[in-house]
Image: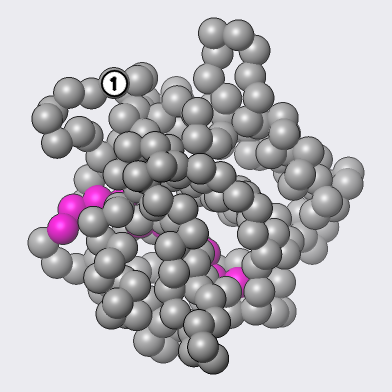
Amino acid sequence: MKYLTGYVKKSGHVVLEKADVCGVEAMMAVCGDLGMPSGEAFGASVTGELKGKLATWFSHIFLNGIKKYGEDYLQAAVMAGTISPAAESPVIGPGCEFGTGCAGMLACGHCAYVWAGEGSGMCVLRCADVLGKKKMVRALSSETGGEDILEIIDDGVFLICPEDMSDDIIHGSSMLTGICDISDDASFDRYLGRMAEGEKAGCIAALLAKER
Protein backbone atom coordinates (compact mmCIF):
# COMPACT_ATOMS: atom_id res chain seq x y z
CA MET A 1 0.00 0.00 0.00
CA LYS A 2 1.41 3.39 -1.05
CA TYR A 3 0.12 6.62 0.49
CA LEU A 4 -0.21 9.85 -1.49
CA THR A 5 -0.96 12.81 0.76
CA GLY A 6 -1.55 16.52 0.37
CA TYR A 7 -3.16 19.57 1.91
CA VAL A 8 -4.37 23.07 1.08
CA LYS A 9 -5.65 25.87 3.28
CA LYS A 10 -7.10 29.34 3.11
CA SER A 11 -7.63 29.55 6.86
CA GLY A 12 -7.10 27.36 9.88
CA HIS A 13 -4.15 25.10 10.59
CA VAL A 14 -2.89 21.81 9.18
CA VAL A 15 -0.33 19.38 10.58
CA LEU A 16 0.61 16.70 8.04
CA GLU A 17 3.26 14.02 8.55
CA LYS A 18 4.10 11.00 6.39
CA ALA A 19 6.72 8.24 6.53
CA ASP A 20 7.60 4.75 5.34
CA VAL A 21 8.84 2.44 8.11
CA CYS A 22 10.27 -0.88 6.96
CA GLY A 23 7.83 -0.88 4.04
CA VAL A 24 4.80 0.13 6.15
CA GLU A 25 3.26 3.44 5.12
CA ALA A 26 2.16 5.81 7.91
CA MET A 27 0.66 9.29 8.08
CA MET A 28 -0.99 11.74 10.45
CA ALA A 29 -3.12 14.74 9.55
CA VAL A 30 -4.79 17.22 11.91
CA CYS A 31 -6.91 20.06 10.48
CA GLY A 32 -8.99 22.73 12.12
CA ASP A 33 -9.03 25.84 14.31
CA LEU A 34 -11.34 27.62 11.89
CA GLY A 35 -12.70 30.03 14.51
CA MET A 36 -16.24 30.29 15.82
CA PRO A 37 -18.87 32.30 13.89
CA SER A 38 -19.35 34.54 16.93
CA GLY A 39 -15.64 35.26 17.12
CA GLU A 40 -15.40 33.63 20.53
CA ALA A 41 -12.46 31.26 20.72
CA PHE A 42 -12.02 28.51 23.26
CA GLY A 43 -9.27 26.03 23.98
CA ALA A 44 -5.57 26.61 23.45
CA SER A 45 -4.22 28.58 20.51
CA VAL A 46 -2.50 26.58 17.79
CA THR A 47 1.17 27.42 18.26
CA GLY A 48 4.37 26.15 16.70
CA GLU A 49 5.02 24.35 19.96
CA LEU A 50 1.72 22.47 19.68
CA LYS A 51 2.40 21.52 16.06
CA GLY A 52 5.86 20.37 17.09
CA LYS A 53 4.37 18.22 19.85
CA LEU A 54 2.15 16.44 17.31
CA ALA A 55 5.04 15.95 14.88
CA THR A 56 7.30 14.64 17.65
CA TRP A 57 4.67 12.17 18.85
CA PHE A 58 4.28 10.89 15.30
CA SER A 59 7.99 10.59 14.53
CA HIS A 60 9.27 9.34 17.90
CA ILE A 61 6.45 7.26 19.34
CA PHE A 62 4.22 6.18 16.46
CA LEU A 63 6.99 5.38 13.97
CA ASN A 64 9.12 3.60 16.57
CA GLY A 65 6.11 1.48 17.50
CA ILE A 66 5.55 0.54 13.86
CA LYS A 67 9.22 -0.35 13.54
CA LYS A 68 8.87 -2.80 16.46
CA TYR A 69 5.38 -4.20 15.89
CA GLY A 70 4.40 -3.41 12.30
CA GLU A 71 1.02 -2.02 11.27
CA ASP A 72 -0.67 -3.80 14.19
CA TYR A 73 0.73 -1.00 16.36
CA LEU A 74 -2.05 1.36 15.21
CA GLN A 75 -4.53 0.03 17.80
CA ALA A 76 -2.03 0.49 20.64
CA ALA A 77 -1.09 3.98 19.44
CA VAL A 78 -4.76 5.02 19.37
CA MET A 79 -5.28 3.75 22.90
CA ALA A 80 -2.18 5.56 24.17
CA GLY A 81 -2.79 8.79 22.24
CA THR A 82 -6.45 9.25 23.14
CA ILE A 83 -5.96 8.74 26.90
CA SER A 84 -4.13 11.36 28.92
CA PRO A 85 -3.24 12.07 32.56
CA ALA A 86 -5.55 14.31 34.59
CA ALA A 87 -5.50 17.98 33.55
CA GLU A 88 -3.76 17.16 30.27
CA SER A 89 -5.17 16.98 26.76
CA PRO A 90 -4.82 13.77 24.72
CA VAL A 91 -2.47 13.95 21.73
CA ILE A 92 -5.07 12.75 19.20
CA GLY A 93 -8.80 12.10 19.14
CA PRO A 94 -11.95 14.18 19.72
CA GLY A 95 -10.64 15.57 23.02
CA CYS A 96 -7.25 16.75 21.78
CA GLU A 97 -6.24 20.38 22.23
CA PHE A 98 -6.16 22.19 18.89
CA GLY A 99 -7.52 25.71 19.05
CA THR A 100 -11.28 25.81 18.50
CA GLY A 101 -11.34 22.17 17.46
CA CYS A 102 -10.23 19.83 14.71
CA ALA A 103 -10.65 16.61 12.77
CA GLY A 104 -7.81 14.24 12.09
CA MET A 105 -6.50 10.94 10.86
CA LEU A 106 -3.78 8.55 11.96
CA ALA A 107 -3.14 5.91 9.31
CA CYS A 108 -0.91 2.88 9.14
CA GLY A 109 -0.85 0.13 6.52
CA HIS A 110 -4.43 -0.92 5.74
CA CYS A 111 -6.26 0.91 8.56
CA ALA A 112 -6.91 4.49 9.61
CA TYR A 113 -8.09 6.00 12.89
CA VAL A 114 -10.22 9.08 12.17
CA TRP A 115 -11.84 11.59 14.50
CA ALA A 116 -13.81 14.84 14.47
CA GLY A 117 -14.32 17.18 17.40
CA GLU A 118 -17.91 18.13 18.21
CA GLY A 119 -18.58 21.69 17.03
CA SER A 120 -15.16 21.94 15.38
CA GLY A 121 -16.60 22.77 11.95
CA MET A 122 -14.49 19.94 10.48
CA CYS A 123 -15.57 16.55 9.15
CA VAL A 124 -14.10 13.39 7.65
CA LEU A 125 -15.17 12.02 4.26
CA ARG A 126 -14.16 8.75 2.63
CA CYS A 127 -14.62 7.04 -0.70
CA ALA A 128 -17.12 4.18 -0.68
CA ASP A 129 -18.98 1.97 -3.14
CA VAL A 130 -22.61 3.10 -3.23
CA LEU A 131 -24.81 0.94 -5.47
CA GLY A 132 -21.77 -0.07 -7.51
CA LYS A 133 -20.41 3.47 -7.93
CA LYS A 134 -17.58 5.20 -6.08
CA LYS A 135 -18.83 8.15 -4.07
CA MET A 136 -17.61 10.36 -1.25
CA VAL A 137 -19.61 9.77 1.93
CA ARG A 138 -19.44 11.40 5.34
CA ALA A 139 -17.64 9.21 7.86
CA LEU A 140 -17.72 11.69 10.76
CA SER A 141 -19.50 15.02 11.23
CA SER A 142 -18.67 17.92 13.51
CA GLU A 143 -22.33 18.05 14.55
CA THR A 144 -21.83 15.18 16.97
CA GLY A 145 -18.11 14.48 16.61
CA GLY A 146 -16.75 11.01 17.17
CA GLU A 147 -14.04 8.55 16.21
CA ASP A 148 -13.67 5.31 14.27
CA ILE A 149 -11.12 2.91 12.79
CA LEU A 150 -11.72 2.29 9.08
CA GLU A 151 -10.19 -0.01 6.48
CA ILE A 152 -8.05 1.54 3.76
CA ILE A 153 -8.66 -0.02 0.34
CA ASP A 154 -6.83 0.32 -2.97
CA ASP A 155 -7.65 3.70 -4.56
CA GLY A 156 -9.31 4.61 -1.25
CA VAL A 157 -9.62 8.31 -0.50
CA PHE A 158 -9.89 9.92 2.94
CA LEU A 159 -10.59 13.63 3.14
CA ILE A 160 -10.61 15.98 6.13
CA CYS A 161 -12.39 19.21 5.27
CA PRO A 162 -14.66 21.95 6.66
CA GLU A 163 -18.25 20.83 7.12
CA ASP A 164 -19.56 23.60 4.86
CA MET A 165 -17.48 22.26 1.93
CA SER A 166 -18.58 18.67 2.38
CA ASP A 167 -21.95 18.82 0.59
CA ASP A 168 -20.34 20.27 -2.56
CA ILE A 169 -17.72 17.52 -2.53
CA ILE A 170 -20.22 14.73 -1.83
CA HIS A 171 -22.82 15.78 -4.39
CA GLY A 172 -20.35 17.03 -6.97
CA SER A 173 -18.03 14.03 -6.60
CA SER A 174 -15.26 16.42 -7.68
CA MET A 175 -12.77 14.51 -5.59
CA LEU A 176 -13.17 11.38 -7.71
CA THR A 177 -12.77 12.81 -11.22
CA GLY A 178 -9.43 11.49 -12.45
CA ILE A 179 -8.32 10.48 -8.94
CA CYS A 180 -7.02 7.06 -10.06
CA ASP A 181 -4.70 8.72 -12.60
CA ILE A 182 -2.75 10.61 -9.92
CA SER A 183 0.78 9.23 -9.71
CA ASP A 184 2.66 11.27 -7.09
CA ASP A 185 2.33 13.65 -4.14
CA ALA A 186 2.99 16.77 -6.24
CA SER A 187 0.15 16.01 -8.65
CA PHE A 188 -2.10 15.24 -5.67
CA ASP A 189 -1.30 18.68 -4.19
CA ARG A 190 -2.23 20.32 -7.48
CA TYR A 191 -5.47 18.34 -7.60
CA LEU A 192 -6.41 19.44 -4.09
CA GLY A 193 -5.56 23.02 -4.99
CA ARG A 194 -8.02 22.97 -7.87
CA MET A 195 -10.66 21.41 -5.65
CA ALA A 196 -10.23 24.14 -3.03
CA GLU A 197 -10.66 26.98 -5.53
CA GLY A 198 -13.70 29.09 -4.75
CA GLU A 199 -15.09 31.44 -2.17
CA LYS A 200 -15.18 29.12 0.83
CA ALA A 201 -12.26 29.28 3.23
CA GLY A 202 -10.86 26.48 5.32
CA CYS A 203 -8.26 23.71 5.30
CA ILE A 204 -8.19 20.30 3.63
CA ALA A 205 -5.92 17.30 4.09
CA ALA A 206 -6.29 14.10 2.08
CA LEU A 207 -4.93 10.59 1.70
CA LEU A 208 -5.08 8.52 -1.46
CA ALA A 209 -3.99 4.89 -1.01
CA LYS A 210 -2.77 2.83 -3.96
CA GLU A 211 -1.37 -0.66 -4.19
CA ARG A 212 2.37 -0.52 -4.83
The residue at which mark 1 appears reads as 42
Q: Position of residue 5 (x, y in %)?
A: 50, 63
Q: Position of residue 167 (x, y in %)?
A: 27, 67
Q: Position of residue 182 (x, y in %)?
A: 48, 82
Residue 204 lies in the magenta stretch: yes
Residue plotted at (54% across, 82% down): 129
Residue plotted at (80% across, 45% down): 73
Q: Is residue 189 above or below residue 155?
A: above
Which stretch is magenta?
200-209
User: In this image, 106 relative to 99: left or right?
Assistant: right
Q: Considering depth in this image, is 99 or 40 the residue closer to the camera? A: 40
Give the prevailing secondary structure in the magenta stretch: strand
State whether residue 33 appears in this view.
yes
Residue plotted at (80% across, 54% down): 71
Q: Considering depth in this image, is 69 or 87 the residue closer to the camera? A: 87
The amino acid type of the residue labelled 1 equals Phe
Residue at the limit of the structure toward the right, as seen here: 68
Residue 117 lies in the magenta stretch: no
Q: How is the image coloured?
A: one colour
Residue plotted at (25% across, 40% down): 34
* SS for callout 1: loop
Q: Position of residue 114 (x, y in %)?
A: 56, 50
Q: Quadrant of residue 80?
A: top right
State whether residue 17 appears in this view.
no
User: In this image, 52 relative to 144: left or right?
Assistant: right
Q: Is residue 207 above or below residue 12?
A: below
Q: Quadrant of residue 13?
A: top left
Q: Quadrant of the N terminus?
A: bottom right
User: In this image, 152 relative to 157: left or right?
Assistant: right
